[in-house]
Structure formats: C-alpha cells, structure tokens
Amino acid sequence: MNEKQDRRVVGKYTGAAVVVSGMIGTGIFTTTGFMAEMGAGAGDILLAWLIGGVLALCGALCYGELGANMPESGGDYYYISRMLHPSLGFLSGWVSLIVGFSAPIAAAAMAMQIYLAEVVSGWPVRLMAVITILLLSILHAYDLRLGVRVQLAMVILKITLIVSFIAGVLIAGPKHDLMRLLEFNPEFWFTSSFAVILIFVAFAYSGWNAASYIGAEIKNADKNLPKSLILGTSIVTVLYVLVNYAYVSSVSVKHLAGVESVANTVGTALWGPSGGKLISVFIAIGLVSTVSAMIIIGPRVYEAMAKDSLFPSGLAKLNKHGVPSPAVGLQGIIAAIFAITSTFGTLLVYIGFTLNIFAALAVFSVFRMRKQGLSSIRVCIGYPLTPLVFLVFTIWMTVWSIHSQPISTIAGLGTLASGYIIYRVQNKRKKAESAIANLPLN
C-alpha cells in the first residue's frame, strides 16, 4: 500500500465531524452581542444567521465539486493555484497561515478561556489559551488516526451540549410572541452595519469548507468529500438558527448588546448565576473541538505549498504516522503569539474580511473548471445560480466592510500585500535556481 493510500483514513461522517467542529466555534457564542450592539433587532439577527447558512451551503456545494474533481489536500490554495493563478494560490495559502487558521485558533482558544473566566475568578485567559493551543498541537502533530478519533468524540459531545442548551432555553425561557421575534427592519438591511453583521456571521460560519483541506486523507474523496461538506454545513446551519432563536426568545436584544459571553448572559437570566456558570463550562468544553479541528486542517495547506516549493520544504515532511508535524508546530507557535498579543474583538472583522476574498475566488474557480471541461463530477446543484449568489453577497459584504471598518480591512490588505511581496521574492529565487540548473556544463 503506497503512502498516499495510507493517508486516506477519514470517512464521510468523520469528515462531516471535522466540518461541524471547525464551524461551531467562537462566532455562535459571541457575535450575536456585537450584532445587537450595531442596531440589529431580533428578526434581523435571525435573518442574518439564515442568510449565512444559505451562503455557506452554496459555498459547500461549489467546494464539493472542486474537491470531487481535485481530491487533494490544500483547500483554497490548491483550487485557486490550479484553476486561476499560482500567485493568487500563494496569497490564499499565506492568508491561511496567518488569518485562516492561526488567528481563529487563537480566537477560539481565547473565547474558551473567556467563558471559563466567568466561572473562576482571576482565570489567566491568555496563558490558558496558549497552553490549550500547544497541548492540542502536540496531539495532532503525532498521529492523525488518534487525532480524528478524539475529534469525533469531542464533536458528539459538542452537539449534545448545544442541543441540550437549545432545549433547556426553549423550555425554561419566557414565552414571547413569535411575531414580535420575527419583526424585520428592511431599511437596516441596506446599511453598512448589516453588511458588517454578515461579516460577523461569515466568520461564525467559516469552516464550512474544512473537509476540502484534508482531501488527501479522505477515503473515496470524490464521493465522501462533497458529502462531508454538505452534511456538516447543513447540520450547523440548523443549530445556528435554533441557538439564536433561543437567545432572542429568552433575553431582550438590548440586554445582549455588546456582550461577548452571550450564552452565559442567557443562562444567568434563566437559571441564575449557577446556571450561567454551568453553561459557560459546557461551552468552554465544546470550544476545545473547534481549536482541535483547525489545528488538524491548517497544516495540510502549508504542506501542499511546501510541496510546490512556495513554503520551506521542511513543512512537507511527514512523520511515521503520515502527519506534517513541522507544519503543525509552526502553526501552533503563530497561534500562541496571536493569543498573547491580540484581543478577541479585534480579530473578528480582520479574519472575516480576509477569508471572504479567497472563498470567493475558490467559488469563482467552479466557472473556470466547467468552462475548461474539467468537471467530470457535477456536485454544484443549481449552477450557475449557486456560485453567483455566493459571489454577489460576498462582494457586497466586502465592499461595505471596507467602508465601515477601515482599520480592520487595512490590516487584511496589509496581510495580502506582505504575502504578495514574499511571493515575488520566492518566484525570483525559483527562476534563478532554474536558470543556474540549466547552465551548460563545461
């Protein structure tokens, strides 16, 4: 059995579990408070989460087609570099290293510790976030089989806790008029604030493409990769809408405005301080799987780029269990630095804005693939409307986020600029090495 076949140990349901655990993270437990602070009503909040789910599903269908026809690891980097241009692929991989995984790993680890700080007075949030990142990085740098078993168990626990939370809130919460909760403000939908809210939602839904990053490790990837993406995304969409319905049906939106630990606020309102603390512990436990999933996924991008000589070759080195352990280690160090130096709130728009750009480029790649006749496996139901819907909303969110959140978007553009400079330097080095190699021998 060859090395490539040895690595294919992830099945359809485990792949879906990676998607679910990668998606359900900090966003669902924190961003609703930011949305309320920006003026969204209960109906607007529920609508935004539903739109986010539809867009994520559109994206999952597009990525499913890309992954079915190119069942290799690397996600955005692999698809964009093959279907559009190597420079865009490099920028995607660079963004994945800094923004796509390292920063969200730090954000998820910090959110986990923020919830624990609600329970334990004086809890060292930053220190414990770093310890969490490093311990999980050590686990996933050792053995993928062991890692995915642990991951699957954590996902089952996470879903159980979330469903229990939803049921508990809906049973214990005050019975509000349903029509009041579904009141909408159409004028608000065409403001920059609503566009930024959708950026928050996009951040919360990020991870719907998680299985595409481990394509080389999925069994029968041409069939199981699309199923993993669609199944995982559908489960999370339903859970997200229900969780937010539980939020706004039990606590008024004005009491959620600006709150980071939203679930704790809801739990405290319904069951008192002890109930709030118990909810915080449950959510912190659930966030472990989010950190874990991203630690699994990200290094496969850096491995793919190292194989293409765009990152140091050592990042493509596999240990005896087929894991790119140096890449896992590098990502863990960068994530730990983010956890030490950044605040949670400053990471949200920066991450969402930057990732949206490359998700849009990858989705656009579906048009290129079909035009060139390279899509022998058709997965994208509703083509061309499905990718068009995704692209239109993504472009709209991106334009408005530049207008209303210039500092965060400038940081994102700075990340892109630094990546492009590195690409040009790398490209010149490769050309020089190629020219030297082709010199005639005397």
Image (cartoon, rainbow, N blue to C red):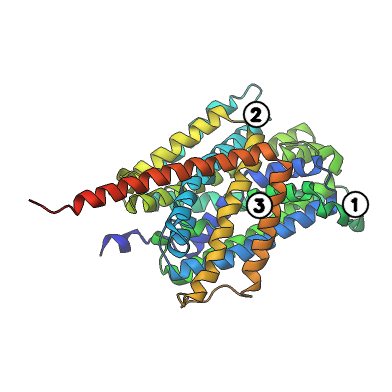
Question: Disc 3 designates what residue?
Answer: 202
Whether residue 239 is visible: no
Label located before the other in sequence (1 or 2)? 2
Q: Position of residue 52 (x, y in %)?
A: 69, 57
**Left or right: 405 as drawn, with respect to 40:** left
Amino acid under disc 3: Ala
Q: Nearer the viewer, residue 92 or 118?
A: 92
Q: Nearer the viewer, residue 283 or 49?
A: 49
Label located before the other in sequence (1 or 3)? 1
Q: Position of residue 344 (x, y in %)?
A: 63, 34
Question: Disc 1 designates what residue?
Answer: 176
Q: Position of residue 319 (x, y in %)?
A: 29, 47
Q: How many marks?
A: 3
Q: Residue at x 55, y 51 (%)?
A: 22
Give above or below for 66 relative to 409.
below
**Whole-number angstrom distance, CA of label 2 to CA of label 3:** 26 Å
**Left or right: 348 as drawn, with respect to 182:** left
**Whole-number angstrom distance, CA of label 1 to CA of label 2:** 31 Å
Q: Residue at x 40, y 50 (%)?
A: 146
Question: Disc 2 designates what residue?
Answer: 117
> Disc 1 or disc 3, which is closer to the eye?
3
Label located before the other in sequence (2 or 3)? 2
Instruction: Name the residue at the left extreme.
Output: 442
